[in-house]
Amino acid sequence: MNKFILVLFLFALGSCQKNPEEDNYRIIKEEDFEIISITSEKYYFEEIINPSNIGLVGRKVLISEAWRVPEEHPRIHIIDSKNWTYDKPKGKFGEGPLEVIDASLFFKGKNADTFWAYSMNRRKLVEYSMSDSTLLGKSEWKMTEPMMDLWFFTQATDSSYLGISREDKNRILEFDKAGNKIGGYGNWEKVKDQPDLNDYQLSELNSSFFKGNSDEGLFIRVGLRRDRLEIFDNRDKSFMIIDGPDMELPPFELVGADGKEHLYLGPDPRYHYRDAVVTEKYIFALYAGVRHSEFNKTAIMAEQIWVFDHKGKPRWKLMLDRSIINFVVNEESNEIYGLTTDEDPGIAVYNIPKELL
């Protein structure tokens, strides 16, 4: 009888213990993905000089110009994806009210007619109407002092933002709509061979792009310098971390003095992930795997989109016929829109494969 009770106790104990490989950490390999090649149709617009970012609000595609484009040109262009025609420009260049230097990110507005553009240079959000003809915004919101260290951020709920910092101890920070910090989630793990790296240095090592989907409550960091994808579930504040296939950290050295050393990754570091999108079913992650010198020679940045489910399980590797720098997914039309990196950059339009539908 006592032996029987002991067996039941050990069984119950084992069933309660969580397997970290399954619950919050996963290592992936190349062979985990099913490969699908997809082809595109490219649309070029002469009004766009040097595009740098792409967004999507409804059926309207938003394109931002690189900061180095001459000041007389608008910073934002609106394209109608229904018939792939140029709609109108937005974004008057300047440092004054309702003007922007750049447009690094786009967010949907309060209604179908409006959108927000984030000017990283001026640390503010500017709201635009898609129906009027003025280049100026209609309102703006400047980031507060607690948000000044954010590198990327996005709308989390109707009343909050999530962002990633340059030097905070947490992977993701939360702010209310007034710009007050209300939470921090996920501490950095120490590097085995460099246990003395501080929060700023660990943040540099894990530098990422940050995207999300407020409707799904999922937000992701995709590593620029290492093969790491971090899924954050805002509903229960939990993380799933996916490493690989390349498990090596980038070589680096500490430079600087007086306790302000930062990571130097060499003159020609390799790009890993370049962008990501969270949809109702999947996580799409754009992967590069090239060095800056290679990009300068070939103009090829990223030709693969890795597709995961919401739990981080690898599903498909979409092999693209063109190099793109970032992308959006239109879930209404089941299309992917990518910003190309060729000599005459435009928008590459891909149909999402039937296997994903």
Image (spheres, rainbow, N blue to C red):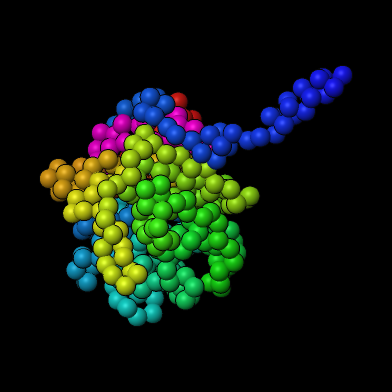
Q: Check the image and name the residue furthest to the front.
A: 2
Q: Check the image and name the residue furthest to the right.
A: 1
Name the residue rendered at 79%, 24% in the picture: 6
State the image quarter where residue 152 is shown.
bottom left
Magenta residue span: 302-324
Viewed as shown, does residue 228 lie left or right of 2? left
Q: Is residue 182 above or below residue 305?
A: below
Q: Taken as a whole, is the magenta stretch helix, strand or loop?
A: strand
Q: Is residue 355 above or below residue 111?
A: above
Name the residue rendered at 22%, 57% in the picture: 50
**Is residue 89 shown to the viewer in this render?**
no
Viewed as shown, does residue 135 lie left or right of 344? right
**Is residue 321 shown to the viewer in this render?**
yes
Q: Check the image and name the residue furthest to the left.
A: 297
Q: Nearer the viewer, residue 215 or 300?
A: 300
Quarter holding the N terminus?
top right
Name the residue rendered at 47%, 46% in the picture: 230
Whether 77 is among the magenta residues is no
Residue 67, image x, y percentages = 25, 65
